[in-house]
Amino acid sequence: MTHAQQAARFADVADVSARLAAAGYLPDAQIATTVFLADRLGKPLLVEGPAGTGKTELAKALATATSSDLIRLQCYEGLDEARALYEWNYKKQLLRIQASQGTDGADWGDLHDDVFGEEFLLSRPLLTAIRREDPTVLLVDETDKADVEVEGLLLEVLSDFQVTIPEIGTIVATRRPMVVLTSNATRELSEALKRRCLYLALDYPSAEREREIVLSRVPELAPALAEQLVRTVRALRAMELKKSPSISETLDWAQTLLALGLDTLGDDEVRATLGVVLKHASDQTRAAAELRLN
Amino acid sequence: MADGGLPAHLDGFVRAVREAGIPVGISAAVDAAQVLTAVDLLDREQLRHGLAAVLLQRAAQRQTYDVLFDLWWPLSDRPEDDADTEPAPDDGSTDAQRQAALAAQLREELLRRLLDGDEEALRRFARLAVDQLGQGQPSPSGQSFFSYRVLRALSPDTLVSQLLDGLLGGADRGGLAEQVARQTVRERLAAFRAAVEAEVRRRSAAERGRDRVARTAVKPLADQVDFLRAQSADLAELRRSVAPLARRLAARLSAKRRMGREGRLDFRRTVRASLATGGVPVVTHHKPRTVHKPELVVLCDISGSVAGFSHFTLMLTQALREHFSGVRAFAFVDSTDEVTRFFAPGADVADAVQRIGREAEVVTFDGHSDYGNAFGVFAEKWATAVGPKTSLLVLGDGRTNYRQPGLPVLADLVRRSRSAYWLNPEPARLWGTGDSAADRYARVIPMVEVRNAAQLAEFVTTL
């Protein structure tokens, strides 16, 4: 690595697991190893997987575990440089120019330097993350939603961690942020972007891990009920549904059972609360038929 | 480890991954070497996940990668320290009897471990079972192992009812509890079978060399599976790739609409906004563009010869219906019928395919493809379906059973449509051979070879 070596945030893989767990996120071996490597190799982490498998949650937990601040760039169709990187505050610049019109002898050079100064720069998430002195986690959320041009912009920023503003000069990161990109894989990200990142495919967790997650997030739930809940959710995921229940929906379901004071998950209970995990009418009909609820 | 030590070994592994169809660039290979310095090499799982993080770019590649990883970085051949599975003592009984007794004993243990659900223990048991039951006849080329021997001796599928009893814990059969338990049983049995196969591969690799095993053990990626040869398991896998593909196609079609993001200048709003900046129009406002809705007509051959392909394309049609209202689907064998009504949003594709076979009038004569008649019926009965705003998509192999191909009718349809494509699941070199009229069709309509999901995805991006 040619760039200045950053002090490592984590000692080893076990350290990653322990600190993420302390931040309320239970990683499996794959997640912990990949996060550790992202830190060691100084590379951005690209997390891909279906909605609701804890991609954004991982970035938040990382920020907590490394006592960093989280800066989030939410991608959407039509996101552009002005929203992602920086923008000049035109209105304020205009006011400044108009204000100086009255005073005589205002030199154009001075005015130009003044108008394109720090004061008139609107810093957007990418620039903010690069300029910060404090430890930072930069989350680029739902990268696949953004247009292809934004990927080019990200490439530039993520490979060198520097931004060139023509009027000011090049701003180099004094302290490299830890970067997490998430994607729902609605479209294939470009090879160039993937090459610069470590790739982590997040899928639904194993039964055992999901039970642990449920119990750690909803500790009041009886372990036997959690087991039953997780197995039911897995049966739902095995069906061909429009939208498989995600981890967050499992947690919602656990909360619901708790709120309703139910202590078993039988036919009636599932039928009454199926709406918490399945949000399409056709999915509900299908699940009810395949689980023989009637 | 081979000569050349760890770097050479890693290089061999990277090359094997590449050969399996996963593109690994030079920079990724360099990163892989760096991973070796960062992770704890004694922890095999860390190495597995660490290398995966730099070598893979898509979730679908993971299965192939895991098979190769197990071959290149195998578990050591340490003797099992399970004390409770001593091989049966030699008490003079015949070989077959001893084998049967051993199988029965292991079967009981398998039941116990499946009920328990501890994956690590199950994997260890699979290794033991292969060792004890999987040996084939010793041949001059060495000892070989077979997974079918293990699975036949233990016949795990017959344990299902006992497993259900165990998991339900005395509760009644039927209803939700049983369905959930069944799913758990399915998962655990699949895990056991996979573990047995992995162990057999490992042992074969030790005997026959891992390159040979790697070539046969690695299944093609789901999007590389040939439509015409797809098994039902492949189709289930393919089904998962359909939704993203449809989304991409939809995005593709609507991206064209978005070109030049904004429409004409909205003068009134721009002037109104300029008041905030002292009359200088800093920000311009534009009128939104009028949205043009693409119309798509899908004409799909559903005869037996292209069953796998048509199933897939019908799934795609269904997925597209969720994005566009203007999709109309027509199916034909020797006659054509509109099948749009079977694809209401939310309908099940497997259901729809069955209902089409039952209810749609796609067969009038003998159930063999007759493209000429099918096109004729379509052009006659649904003359207005194809107009200047319509994209026409014909799906089929173009095998006419030596009947009239109906070229003029198709040419007329193509002329009337905005754009038209024919997707053919046969390799291009077979077009025009035998009863295929694909080469003649290709003269009147752009024909694209689409043998697998990857080629379909490629076609979509060139639209």
Image (spheres, rainbow, N blue to C red):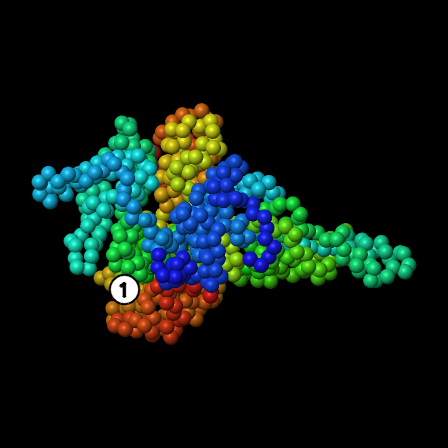
Instruction: Pick the quarter of the image with the C terminus of chain A.
Output: top left
- The answer to whether residue A227 is visible is yes
Circle count: 1
Q: Nearer the viewer, residue A24 or B203?
A: B203
Q: Nearer the viewer, residue B145 or B238?
A: B145
Q: Residue at x 54, y 49 (%)?
A: A39
Say if A4 sits above or below B393 in the image. Answer: above
Residue in view at x 74 percent, y 55 percent = A90
Which quadrant, please, contains the N terminus of chain A? bottom right
Rendered residue at 52%/44% (across/down):
A11
What residue would you read off at disc 1? B369
Q: Residues within 10 Å of mark 1 (few under 14, many from 20)?
A: many
Which residue type does callout 1 highlight? Ser
Q: Secondary structure at mark 1?
A: loop
B166, B439: nearer the viewer: B166
Judge by depth and name the residue closer to the eye, B59 or B292.
B59
Q: Residue A46 appears at what percent x and percent y?
A: 51, 52
Quarter-wise, where is residue B433 in the image? bottom left
Q: Is B396 positioned to the left or the right of B89 in the image?
A: right
Q: Position of residue B247 (x, y in %)?
A: 46, 54
Can the viewer see residue A271 in this picture?
Answer: no
Position in image of residue A193 (x %, y %): 52, 58
